[in-house]
Image (cartoon, grey):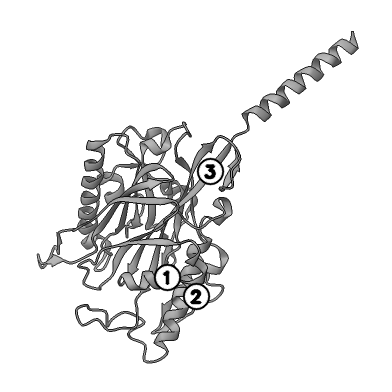
Amino acid sequence: MKSLKLLIILLALISVSNLSAQEEKRYKIHTVAFYNLENLFDTINDPLKYDEASPIMEMNANRSEVYKKKIKNMARVIANIGSDYANNSPAVIGVCEIENRQVLVDLVNDPLLLGKDYGIIHFDGPDKRSIDVALLYQKALFKPIAESSHELMIYDNITRKRVFTRDQLLVSGKLDGDLIHLLVNHWPSRSGGEARSRSKRVGAAKLNKRLIDSLQSIDPYAKIFTMGDLNDDPTNESVKDVLKAKKEKEDVELKGIYNPFEKMFTEKGYGTTAYRDAWSLFDQIMMTQPLLEDDYSSFRFWKAGIYNKAYLSNKRGRYEGYPFRSFADGGFTDGFSDHFPVYVYLIKEVEEDTEEDTTKG
């Protein structure tokens, strides 16, 4: 009798083991990221732009050496984002605080990124400081279909004059065969105070929402990412009331928006930039509901994160733990940016082992 019981238990264990082996799945992983490059300006004075006030142009010497080092530092960070799981740099990455296309050409041709063969999508914008947004993409992974720049018409509450700020970039394309849409943002700053400047970011959010709505009117199941330095936290009016972004995936309905960074901010106290001993999570990546579904036959959201490795932080002094920025007190620090990058991982189930980046689930 004991022998029979042991045989039954053994057969049951073998069955469970076989089932687990059958249920083990493999996934392809890609990274979508965003990074504020903190004043990535060249060393040439453009007479048509107000670039004289950029930190590098205010330096009296060694501009060329500083520019080369700044490019190399930015390339190092971008090359490392996503490598923990995807074993690759981002498939697509939105960037802001760049002066022109040429600085991006120099960036993607740095030895650390050259082998990734990044393409560039950039439009010259009307920002008074001559800073723009752009999208970089690995040509082997992402195929652009449409790209457009959308002007933000906002006005100062006191003077009623137009505020010339960054356009919003919209790019549609296929990521490894899946159609996705990406909005890259750099919303108006908090200059003059959060309350006084709030309406400008609300205006930016309204433009963003109109662009998302226009995509969803064509296809309610559109996979849309909106990313950027919003100069607002996930709990501010622009994000919560205008975009109506949700903290919990379960609360996101069709045509709704999910913000994985809200929980990091409200429950864990994480941030991407710091000021006067307070953290803000201005850099965010949000997405629409179809990216949250459980069917992994196409790319879906897996997890989000802040890329805040130790080398990106100040090690000592008054600003210990803050992002190790590039420029301070009128000089170059050999740092990186005053913002940490953010990223999300997308996964898709694969039928069998390939040479592409995969993870077991």
Residue 196's place in the image compared with 301, above or below, is below
| Tags 2 and 1 touching, CB below 8 Å | no
Q: Quadrant of the C terminus?
A: top right
Q: Residues within 10 Å of mark 3 (few under 14, many from 20)?
A: many
Q: Earlier in the sequence, mark 3 or mark 1?
A: 3
Report which residue position mark 1 lands on.
107
Left/right of residue 1 with respect to residue 95 in the rendered view: right
Q: Report whether residue 322 is seen.
A: no
Q: Nearer the viewer, mark 2 or mark 1?
A: 1
| Circle 2 residue | 318
Judging depth in this view, the residue of 180 and 199 nearest the camera is 180
Amino acid type assigned to the residue bearing label 2 in the image: Arg
User: Percent position (x, y) of residue 345?
Assistant: 48, 47
Q: Quadrant of residue 43?
A: bottom left
Total marks placed: 3
Q: Residue furthest top?
A: 1
Question: Residue 49 at what x, y percent from top left?
Answer: 22, 77
Kindly identify the amino acid type of the residue bearing the numbered disc 1: Leu
Q: Are marks 3 and 1 in contact (CB under 8 Å)?
A: no
Instruction: Please say whether residue 126 is visible from this viewpoint.
Output: yes
Disc with the residue nearer the chain's start (2 vs 3): 3
Residue type for callout 3? Lys
Quadrant of the drawing holding the N terminus: top right
Q: Which mark is residue 28?
A: 3
Residue at x 45% of width, y 80% of height: 68
